[in-house]
Each structure stands twice: as structure tokens, then as C-alpha cells.
Image (cartoon, rainbow, N blue to C red):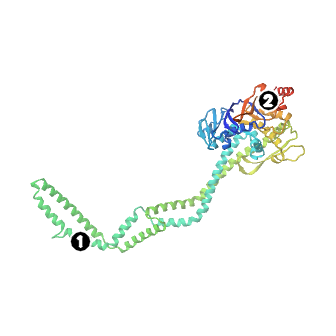
Amino acid sequence: MLTNLSIQNYALIDDVNVAFPKGFTTITGETGAGKSILLGGLSLVLGKRADLTSLKNEEQKCVIEAEFDLSKYQLQQFFKENDLDYEDVTILRREILPSGKSRAFVNDTPVTLDVLKALGDQLVDVHSQHQTMRLTENDFQMKVVDALAGNADNLKEYGAQLQLLKKAAKELNELETFQSNADKEHEYNSFLLKELEDAKLKEGMQEELETEYEQLSNVEQIMEQLSTGHQLLNDEQLGILGRLADLRRAFQALTEFGPAYKSLGERIESVLIETDDIASEIEQLKDTVEADPARLEVVNGQLQLLYDLQKKHHVATVAELIVLRDELALKVEAVANIESKIAEKKGEVDRITQQVEAWAQNIHKARKGIVPKLKQVLQENLASLGMPSATFKIEINPSNTFKANGKDDLEFLFSANKGSSYGELKKVASGGELSRIMLTIKSILAAYEHLPTLMFDEIDTGVSGEISNRMGEIMQQMSRNMQVFSITHLPQVASKGQYQFKVYKEESEQGTSTHIKQLSVEERVRELAEMLGGKSISESALAHARELLQ
């Protein structure tokens, strides 16, 4: 419930701070006193967009704070989802700066305007003439039916299953689209994959083939150089091995003359051993090297295939070809398995559809069952509001499509007079009739679900006398379970409030400003008497006012 409202530098308001009690509060004041300004300030802190015209003094910022008792609202999850610290006593604050920028806060934590509005919608239901038109909307009408039908849990389960169905249907559509597009590319991708698989690609194979190609292409030069090396090492007269053997023998005779000679002898021995090993390897290579035109042709063909594939796919290495091959394999496999995936997804869609259908049927049955009671309550309440011949034709018909709130079409028709044909509310109901219907519906909703604070802005426009008295009684009854405000021009309604506030203007040298105050019992008598008979208050008006309060 709204416990306190503070408004600074807004429209005609300099600084207003007012505490509100629970129950039924009426707000009165002369036309133009600023009741709409008060409501406008509250709307800003509930998330309505603002501009610089909101500022009374354009050089100072406008600050509006609303304090709420949230202990009965079960909003902890909302605060958690929006990363806000929950407190039973929560303050919403809105600031409009002279620059035109706007800032919003919940318990001093900055929030976006969307978050502020989402929270505000759950705290205060401001009912204006514009909102009365919601009564003509099918979604709102269905909400009323569902409230009486107790469909909250059914709708929650239905909504969860419907989201799963939409997700599965989207995935099925993506698979079918993929299949449609993939079928066109599948044959070509399969051809490319076979080319790459036939190439038997391996990391490093290109370097190995290029090395082998160079050897086979230059076999005569290699054999000639190996022969020359073999001769240089093994020639009987001048061969390196023979000369090193002579050198070793020469130094063997010197090893006894000191460590330096011994070290040189050991080094010469190492060189001789290494050189002898080189000679053996050269001889082995010389025996294995031979011309192989057939193998040269094979290697050349393999290399040319690699070069052609790299050019075709615009890559420079075998490693890149391997990556491309693996990607193509996945695409080809995906197409090969798409039929089974589509069949599996269709089965999932069918299973979820059955679940959604089952919950939709539960919702439908509950709605059908409550329609007679809804019609009866509406007609009885409207009869007490001066519409004794008002009747409704409410029908719930199954549709072929799943909607956000079930699988039904609602026909909500109205007739104000006996013998008149039924028609849609927006076509056949007057503004005054719509207001009375909306009040009746709000009172019905209040009995079946926990509504936020209700702020009625002149819902009693166009009615008077006993009807306005009955409207006040309905709001009074609603306030037993919730906080209700009514901005009104009618003394009959104003008198029904447990509390009454007056909005008034004061003029000074600095200009005109709007104020609000709670009226005492005697002040209420005079305010009601003025509403009954004008500025010139008579004793009969005062007596009538006291009678209304009693």
C-alpha cells in the first residue's frame, strides 16, 4: 500500500509531503485545484515518461518519492530478478533534472524506467477514463473471467508448456529450413569431401613429398657427389681415413710425454671414429640411391594433387585442407542424419502439444463453468447502480490456435436496456455505463485476487444521487481488503471514505501553488456542504453533510 507521497517542484506544487492510511481515502477539491497534478506526480514515480514542462522552477530538479508497504505483495522474486535489495518498506524515487534528463531509483538503487514501471504496475492501479476503455479489450475481459474461474495455476502451467512448444517448433523449423538449403549443397559437398578423402591427407605429407621429389629428380648428381665423397675418404694413397690413421699412430708415440699430447691423441681418435662412421653412411647411401622414374611420377602426381586442391580451396597448407575436410564431413553427416533429427523433433513437438492442449482444456472448462456466475454478479451489481435492465451475453468458444492465455475465443456482449440487441461494449455502452461496469468488475476482481492499491480518478463522472451513493459503498467494501483512493466531485462518494483529503490552490506574490491536506471531521462537514450547495454554505447543506458522514 502507498504510505507516503512527497512531491517537489512539479507543475504547481512547490513541496508536498503527505502520509496516506490504509482503507478507503477520498480526495476532493475544486476544479482546477490540482487533483490531476497530484495524480500526475504519482504517475511519474510509477514510471510514466516526463519532460521539462513537469518542472515548476526550470532551474531546479523535480523530485518525487513514494513510500510503499510491500509486506503483503510477494514481490521478493521481482527484486531478485532485477538485482534489487528487497525491503518491506520500499521507496520509489523519480528525479527530473533541468537538463531534461530523468533518473529513477528503488531504495536508492538506480533503475531503468522500464523496471520502475514494471514495479509500479504491481503497486498501484491508476484507473482513469482512458483505462476504462481497457474494459472493451478482449484480453482484459478474459482476465476477469480467469480471475473468477481460479485459472491462475492453470494459466501458469499452460504458459510454461506453451513456451516449450514455441521453442521446439522453432527448432523444428530451423531443422527443416536447414534440410531445404542443405539438400541443394549436399551433392556438391559430398563431391568435395570425396576429393579430399581420396588425397589421404596427413600433417607434414607435403614436406615429405617435396623432399622425396627433389631427391628423385637429382639422383645422378647425388650419386656423383656420394662417389666423390667415398673416394676422398677411402683412396689408398690420399684417402682421408688413411691419413687420419697415420696421424693417430704418430701421436700414439707422444702420449707418454704429457697430458697435452694424450688429449690431442684422444681427439684425433674421435675424429677418426666419426670420419669412419661418415664413410660407412656414405657407402650405404651410395648403394641405395638409384633412379626410379616410376616413383618420381607417383610423387609428382601426389604433389600436383595437393597444389591443385590448395588452389581450388584458396588455402596454402595441407593442415588447412584437413580442417576443410573435417568441416565438410560434419556438413555431409548432418544432412545424412537430418531426417532422423526432424522425426525426433516432430515427436517432441507432438508430445508438448498434447500437454499444452490438456492445460488449455482445463482452462476452458473452468471458464465455461464460471460464466453463469459472472453474468449473475455483473447484472446484480449493475442493477444496484441504476442499470436494472443491463444484461450480458458471455460465451467461451474453443479456437484452433494456442494463444498467450489459452485456446479460447471470448464473446463479451452487452445490452443496457430490455429488448435491445447485444453488442460489443465499445459500441453500445456509454461512458457512464462503462465506468459503472468497470467499477463492478474491479470490485469482483478484488474479491478473487490480490489487487494493488486502486486509484479511481473520477470514475463516478456522469452519475449522481443514489447511484453515486452505491458506487461509494462498493469502493468502501473493496477497501476492506485493499487500499482504495477515489478522486471525486460527488459528496455522496467523498463521504464514504474513512479519510478525506482536500487539494487546494494558494496564491501569493511568488505565484500559485497546489497543496493537499487531510481534513478533520468538522472540515469534512464544511467541504461536503460546499460540494452540495456551493460556496455559500447553508445550514441545510451542513445538516445534509453531517447526515452523509453518519
Residue drawn at (46%, 69%) of the image: 308
Mark 2 vs mark 1: in front: 2
Q: Looking at the image, which residue sits at the far front?
A: 509
Q: Where residue 259 sits in the image (x, y, percent)?
A: 13, 53
User: Which sits in the foreground, 529 or 279?
Assistant: 529
Secondary structure beneath disc 1?
helix
Quarter of the image containing the C terminus? top right
Under mark 2, the amino acid is Glu
Asked if 151 appears above or below 310 in the picture, the reply is above
Q: Where does label 1 land, which residue?
A: 228
Residue drawn at (19%, 59%) of the image: 270
User: Which sits in the foreground, 534 or 267?
Assistant: 534
Quarter of the image containing the N terminus? top right
Count all numbered tags in the image, as a single digit. 2
User: Which sits in the foreground, 395 or 69?
Assistant: 69
Q: Where does label 2 land, which residue?
A: 527
Q: Where residue 148 sits in the image (x, y, percent)?
A: 76, 39
Secondary structure beneath disc 2?
helix
The numbered disc on residue 100 is none
Residue drawn at (81%, 39%) of the image: 461
Q: Disc 2 versus disc 1: distance between alpha carbons?
A: 129 Å
Asked if 214 appears above or below 162 in the picture, the reply is below
Identify the image quadrant of residue 304: bottom left
Can the viewer see residue 50 in this picture?
no
Identify the image quadrant of residue 50: top right
Q: Where residue 343 sits in the image (x, y, percent)?
A: 62, 56
Identify the image quadrant of residue 230: bottom left
Under mark 1, the amino acid is Thr
Can the viewer see residue 183 in this picture?
yes
Q: Residues within 10 Å of mark 2 (few under 14, many from 20)?
A: many
Tell which circle, 2 or 1, labels the residue nearer the N-terminal end: 1
Image check: 105 left or right of 377?
left
